[in-house]
Image (spheres, rainbow, N blue to C red):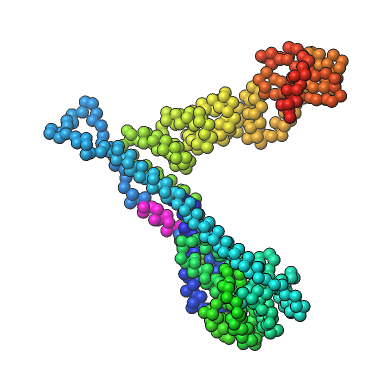
Amino acid sequence: MNAVLKVFLSMSFSGGLLILALFLGNRFLKDKISRQWQYYIWFVVVLRLLLPFGTDVSLLGKTYQAVDQAITQAAPLPRQQPAPNIQGSNIAPAVGIEPDNENTNSPADDLTTARQFQDMEAFLINHAWLLWLAVALGFLIRKITIYQGFIWYIKAGLVPVSNIEILDRLSIVEEQSGIKNPIELCVNPLVSSPLLIGFFHPCIVLPSVDIPEKDFRYIALHELTHYKRRDMFYKWLVQIIVCLHWFNPLVHLMSREITKTCEFSCDEAVLVKMGYDNAQDYGKTLLNAMEAVGKYKENLGAVTLSENKQLLKERLRAIMNFKEKSTTIRFLTGALTLCMMFGAAFVGVYPVAAAANHTEDNLQRTVDKNTQGNTATSGDRYFRMAEKYYEAGSLPLFEIAFPQLDETAQKTWLAKLYTDSDFAFFSVAVRGLGANSHLLADFTEKAYTDEKIVFFSILADCMDETELELWLNRALEDGKWNFQSMLFDRLDKSDEFDELKDEKDKEWAAAQEAEYQAAGVIMDGKDYYYQGKLVNIFLDIQTNKSYYTLNMNPAGTVNIRIIRDTNNRITGVAYMTEAEVAELLNDMA
C-alpha cells in the first residue's frame, strides 16, 4: 500500500479512537464541565486527523508493524523450480511416465502468472489514493458550491439596516465585546433565525428589525461572539476534515457534535459576559427567534442563533442550569485537556520511516528464505530482482537488491545506468558497492575521461579528502575548470578557486589581446581598431562554437570578423559583407 495513504488511514483510525473517547466522555460529563471546553477540545481531534504527528513509539505504529509482519510471514513463498538433471548423474527418468504437455503448466509459467497477478494487485493498491482523493475533492467542491448558492440567495434579498437607533445599539454591543472592526447589519425576511455570514466582511442578518431592545442585545452579542471566536473558520476546517476522511463515519459524527457544541459554548460565553441572572431572558430570546417567518434553512457555512427546534429544548435546559464552574471543575478540565493531548500523541500514526525500514527487513527475510539452500541460482535471482525494481522505478528496493549482486553483475548494472544517464539509480548503486571495490576507481576514471561531471560528482561522494586532493591536482594539470570547481567546493576551498579563476581570466584576456594585435586588431578598453579605423561590429567565433566575442560600437565605421583554422588559431581578419551583417542582426533580433 502507498506509504502516504497508509499514514493517512492511520490518522483516520487514531482520530476515530479519540472521537469515540471524547463523545462518550462528553455524554457523561456534559452537565458537569464547561461547554466551551467541550467545544474547543475537539480541536485536538481535528489536529490528530489533519497532522501526522506522534511519538517515536506509538500504539498505532506498533500495531501496524505487527500486522505487516504477520502478513509477510503468512504469505506463501514462490514455488521453487525443480533442479535440472545434471549431465553424468545416475538419476534416470521413471518408466511409463510421459509428460502431459496439454494439461500441465511448467513452474516458470505458474510463477509468471502469479507475478502478473501480484503486479496488478500492487498497482491497484498503490493507486488507491487516487480514488480517495477524487472522492474528497468531489465532496469539497459540492460543499463549496452549496455554500456559494446559499450566500448568493441570502445576499439577493439583503436590505441594509439604515435605522440609526438600531445601528447605535449594535455599535454599543460591539464596543462591549471588544470588536473594533464595524459589522454590517442587514435584513432578509427569508432567513429562519438571525445569523452571521462572511469570513472577511462579516454581516449579521436578521429576519426583521422589529425586535425588542433586550432581544436585540442578546442576538447581537451571540453573533458577535461567533465572529470574535472565528467559529466560521473552525466550522469550515471541520468540513475540510470531513471531506478528507469521507470514508470514516466517526468523522461525520464529530462534525455534528462540533456544530451542536458550538451553539452551547456560545450560549455559555454570552451568559458569562451578561451574568447568569439573565439566563431566563436569554432563553426567551431563543424562543422568540424560533417564531421568525423565514423558511430558508441555514447552511453549514453560517453561524446562527438557533439551529433547529430539536436542539432548542436542550439548549434552554443548559441555559437555565447555567452557573459558574468551581475551581475543582476547572482543575479537572485542565487535567482532561492534558490527557487528550498526550493521548493524541501516544495513539500516533503509522511512521513512514519505520514503514520503509520494515518493508526492507521483510524483503530481506523473504529473499533469504527464497535463496536458502539454492545458492547456485541466488545470483540470477538477485539480478532479476534488481531488473524488476529498476523497471518499476523503485529506488529503495533496488538499493536493497544491488549489494547482493556479484562484482560482474554490479559492473554490468553500473555500465547500464551510466549509459542510460540514470543519475538517481547510479547514485544508490554506488552506495551499495563495497569500500574496497575497484569499480569505484574504474568508473571514476571513466567519468573523468568522458567529462561526465554529474557521474564524477556522485562518485566523489565516496572519496576521502586525500583522494579528492589527488583528483584536484590532476584537474589543475589538465585545465578542466568544471572538475576543478566541483572539487574545490567539496574540499571547502571555493575562495581559492575564485582567486585562481580571476588569475586565469586575466591571463587569458592578455593572451587574447596579444593574439588580436598580431592579426592587426588593436584593443583600447572596450573599443576595437582595425587598420586605424574604429570598428562598429567585431565578431570572433571559436571553431567549435563553444565561445564567441561580439562587440558593437555605434561610433565605428567598419565591420570585421576573425578567421580561425581547425586548431582554433587566428589566420586572418575579414570585412563583413552587408549580407553577413544583416544575418547577424536578424539572428540577434
The residue lying toward the viewer, choosing from 165 and 571, is: 165
Secondary structure character of the magenta stretch overall: helix
Q: Position of residue 368 (x, y in %)?
A: 36, 42
- Outermost front residue: 157
Residue 284 within the segment the image draws in magenta = no
* Image: 119 above or below 30: above
* Image: 174 above or below 435: below
The residue lying toward the viewer, choosing from 240 and 403, is: 240
Q: Position of residue 110 (x, y in %)?
A: 29, 40
Residue under the point 17% across and 32% down: 93
Residue under the point 22% across and 35% down: 101
Which segment did they paint magenta?
61-71
Q: How many marks?
A: 0
Report if residue 131 is visible in the image.
Answer: yes
* Image: 184 above or below 49: below
Q: Is residue 363 left or right of residue 503?
A: left
Q: Is residue 87 left or right of residue 115?
A: left
Residue under the point 71% across and 15% down: 564
Q: Position of residue 203 (x, y in %)?
A: 68, 70
Q: Position of residue 257 (x, y in %)?
A: 52, 72
The residue lying toward the viewer, choosing from 485 and 112, is: 112
Q: Is residue 206 left or right of residue 433?
A: right
* Image: 254 above or below 585: below
The quarter of the picture where the C terminus appears is top right
Report if residue 58 is visible in the image.
Answer: no
| Quadrant in the picture for residue 184 | bottom right
- Outermost top residue: 571
| Quadrant in the picture for residue 143 | bottom right
- Outermost left residue: 96
Residue under the point 49% across and 69% down: 253
